[in-house]
Amino acid sequence: MIYMFKVGVIGDKDSVLAFKALGVHVFTVSEGDEARKMVDTMARDNYGVIFITEQIASLIPDTVERYDKEIIPAVILIPSNQGTLDIGMRRINENVEKAVGSNIL
Amino acid sequence: MKVGKIIKVSGPLVVAEGMDEANVYDVVQVSDNRLVGEIIEMRGDRASIQVYEETTGIGPGDPVYTTGEPLSVELGPGLLEAMFDGIQRPLEEFRAKSGDFMTRGTKVYNLNREKKWDFKPSVKVGDFVDEGDVIGTVQETPLILHRVLVPIGVKGTVTGIEEGEFTVVEDICVLDGEKKLQMMQKWPVRKGRPYKKKLNPDVPLLTGQRVIDTFFPVAKGGTAAIPGPFGSGKTVVQHQLAKWADTEIVVYVGCGERGNEMTDVLMEFPEIIDPATGESLMKRTVLIANTSNMPVAAREASIYTGITLAEYFRDMGYSVAIMADSTSRWAEALREMSGRLEEMPGDEGYPAYLASRAAEFYERAGKVICKGSDNREGAITVIGAVSPPGGDISEPVSQATLRIVKVFWGLDHALSYKRHFPAINWLNSYTLYQTKMDQWMAANIDKDFAKNRAKAMSLLQEEASLQEIVRLVGRDSLSYEDQLKLEATKSIREDYLQQNAFHEIDTFCSHEKQNKMLKLVLEFYDLGMKALENGVYLKDIEKMPVREKIARSKYIDEAELDKIDEIIKELNESIEKLIQEGGILDA
């Protein structure tokens, strides 16, 4: 049996609405507490990948960190329509450094 | 009796010849100053004598007078509240006679001969009394009723008994028309006083120190050792025990340690009021001082003097605690004498008989049925401090002590450096009374106490292994559960184990308070785990304002223990609230 996970995206309305076109579940939030609850609820609700805009993620570092240690869901940071804060890229670089010992990107 | 002649003087050791009438362990008087000494070895007519006073100015040819008696203490009213030297000479009277420092050859009686005591008989003419029976009582201090006992080896029918004010040497009772008894009796210090039967110690000694009472309790009638490096708080622990131990009598032997430590006792104890009786704690205390500047030979005797006094009070049916600080100085005194006797040295120069002497001393502890027809129960708890050089307990004195004692409170320099007091290391300390004490706790305090204690201890042990991981890879790499565990053990360490000896309330903690506090700190761990499972963030748990109250629970007055229950309730509510707000509730 193939186990099916869902894919969701969290962010401000302007940034994430377009994801709907891809069939991704879209959740719009505007502040930290709301986002935190949203991520936690989605994690319980069988979401395998959660995209989250950097602007929102910067409000809830604890929550992002919490899922770092878990395989599912993968919390992935994306830039928003206001541009990037470079958190997402930095996290990837850090993970690469941890994995291979030096930054090869 | 024949008078001997000195042929050699080596510090406190004097060798005299012409002593063929004397026996080993007899007390002798050395030179015309009449210094007190004790024979510790006989070879032919040559006696080796340890002298309990300065031997400066004594030389070959000086006389030695034998008394034909072993070194004895005088037992009777007048012991309490007093301070004696190693051979039971009262220091207060010494001072009146010869000033602040001891002068050689000063003759003072061990017990005050002039003071009159109000004697109330408890037997009538015609009664038959056996050895150890109570013939009357003296209210020695408001706390302690001194029971006057028939000396060991004496029995008979009372043919005369007095009532009223008497000194300790006046006759108060006549047996069979010929044996006259006084309030005072003598007993040789090196011989344990007899008892009817030894019992198994099964009641814990309440010391008011949480780490001791909860994790490493000592039984009444048990033995404990406190080894620890310099400055780790041995003396403070000993003082705390002397102050708060729930025994009726405390004998404190200051053996070879600093004089100001005895001064502390003299200054502090009279001010501390026993909550149960409203009287000063000094009124149940006997002090024996042989500080580091006093003659070394008397140090060897001070331990025996102390335990003999303790046995005397035990025989009255009291529970007695004797603190010896420090037995290492006593062992060093043995070593010094042994060296001068030119005996074959054992480990580190200590005499080969060190272990048997230490055992002899500790074996005089115990809970017993005393001599006497009323089957009184008495107990002696011995608590000895050991000062291993460098804090390394693999040295002979610590090892000899640990072989005998059943409780080990290991003081740790690292803990005292971190200002964690009492610095008793919970990982290497132990008690062999645990099962018995758990049973008592279950019957008298709370049936869950043993379970909680075991749980707290296993958390502390897990913490030690987690700390190793933290040192290697940092705290953040631990799972949230483990991080909470660290947080909870920090609470056990700081809020429960640490105890301020100089805080008015925190200095003493009853069993009930310990039980509640232990429940409180464990509740934090249990509820925290439950919250984590429900998706609450660790940071939110750590930030709960109620934690401040947990940390301050040790300062709650004994009369207001309900407040701890309130904190437990508040903790439950806070966690419940966190789960409602921040947690992910199962749909």
Image (cartoon, rainbow, N blue to C red):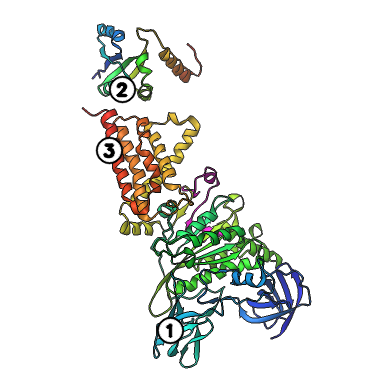
Name the element at disc 1: loop
Side (left or right) of A54 relative to B346: left
Task: Name the amino acid, label 3.
Answer: Glu
Give the residue at mark 1.
Answer: B130
Residue B232 part of the magenta-drawn span: no
x, y percent for residue B236: 52, 54
Front residue of B282 and B222 = B282
First to last magenta residue range: B400-426
Task: Name the amino acid, label 1.
Answer: Asp
Badge 3 crowding class, 10 Å Cα cut-off, few under 14, some 14 to 19, many 20 or more, is few
Give the residue at mark 2.
Answer: A33
Alpha-carbon distance for marks 1 and 2? 84 Å
Q: Nearer the viewer, mark 1 or mark 2?
A: 2
x, y percent for residue B421: 49, 48
Mark 2 vs 3: CB contact within 8 A: no
Residue B573: mark: 3
x, y percent for residue B13: 71, 69
Residue B70 visible in the picture: yes
